[in-house]
Image (cartoon, rainbow, N blue to C red):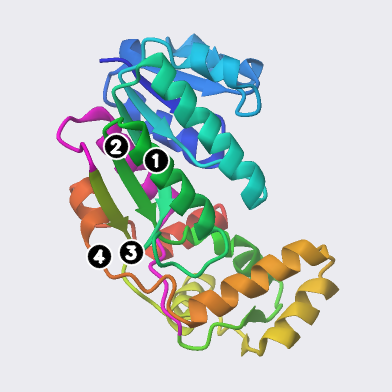
Amino acid sequence: MKMLVTGATGHLGSLVVEALLKTNVTGDLAVSVRSPEKAESLRAQGVDVRHGDFDQPETLEKAFAGIDRLLLISTDGDNETRIRQHQNAVDAAQKAGVGFIAYTSVVNAEKNTLSLAEVHRVTEQAIRESGIPYSFLRNNWYLENEAGSVQAATQGAPWVHATNDGQVGWATRQDYAHAAAAVLAAEGHENTVYELSGKLRTQAELTSIAGEVLGQELNVHNVADAAYADIMKGAGLPDFVVSMLVDMQGAIREGALAVKSDTLETLLGRPAQPLSEGIKAILGK
């Protein structure tokens, strides 16, 4: 059974590959990367490194040749770019005769009000229409998305958000990666949809955990959208990023990520990593 992970040198993909290598599947593992030279360390470990560029469909079809099980990790970029790239990947998988696609989506993809959810709705539909058996790994929020706030807090800066009491199912990127590796490497996940969340918490609860790790009481500011936008602009972020962040804050406030599920721990076969440990990792402790 030949498996392939796309984006294998990225934040999530590298962790998935690391988890798979620990299960002694090296001879059955391939990766698809835009810059193969950046994956030489994987090649040295016996991994089949292939060139695959989401903007060059012909490279994807070649990269996916002979692959039984594919992990399609969602790409970065604006919605239009990502939808086009994901469609290229699905088309290439179909042409290459791939037997199974696991795709990293977002929780409650059909109804999620996050602007980025459109990418996942369209991609999930494309995979369904391809006829290839699938598993949609609908990830909640990565704890690492809060790394900027955590790092700033160590310098005494306030922790700013605009989510009120909106709940989020934070989990570490490592846990999401290990769940993806478990699904990719095992049979029995065909045509499944997994909502993957950590325990639901508010920003107040998260900052309490962060404060305990830092050994200090954090200065938390829950502000209105306009004030949040001004603060982000003051931090030097471009307007399109500020707009995206404000949208995310509003959607979280309205419950877009308040998806309760224990499926992540079921796939992991263990409890999720404590957020305190994840925060320590962000701080390099």
- The disc label shown at residue 134, or none: 2
Span highlighted in magenta in the image: 166-191
CA gap between label 1 and label 4 equals: 18 Å
Residue type, numbered disc 4: Ser
**Residue under the point 60% across and 83% down:** 162
Residue type, numbered disc 1: Tyr
* 10 Å crowding of disc 2: few (<14), some (14-19), many (20+): many
Is the residue 88 above or below the residue 62 in the image? Answer: below
Q: Secondary structure at mark 1?
A: strand
Mark 3 or mark 1, which is nearer to you?
Answer: 1
CA gap between label 3 and label 2 equals: 23 Å
Q: Is residue 186 magenta?
A: yes
Is the residue 260 above or below the residue 188 in the image? Answer: below
Of the numbered discs 1 and 4, the one sitting upstream in the chain is 1
Image location (x, y in percent) of residue 70 = 37, 27
Mark 1, residue position: 103
Mark 3, residue position: 198
Q: Secondary structure at mark 2?
A: strand
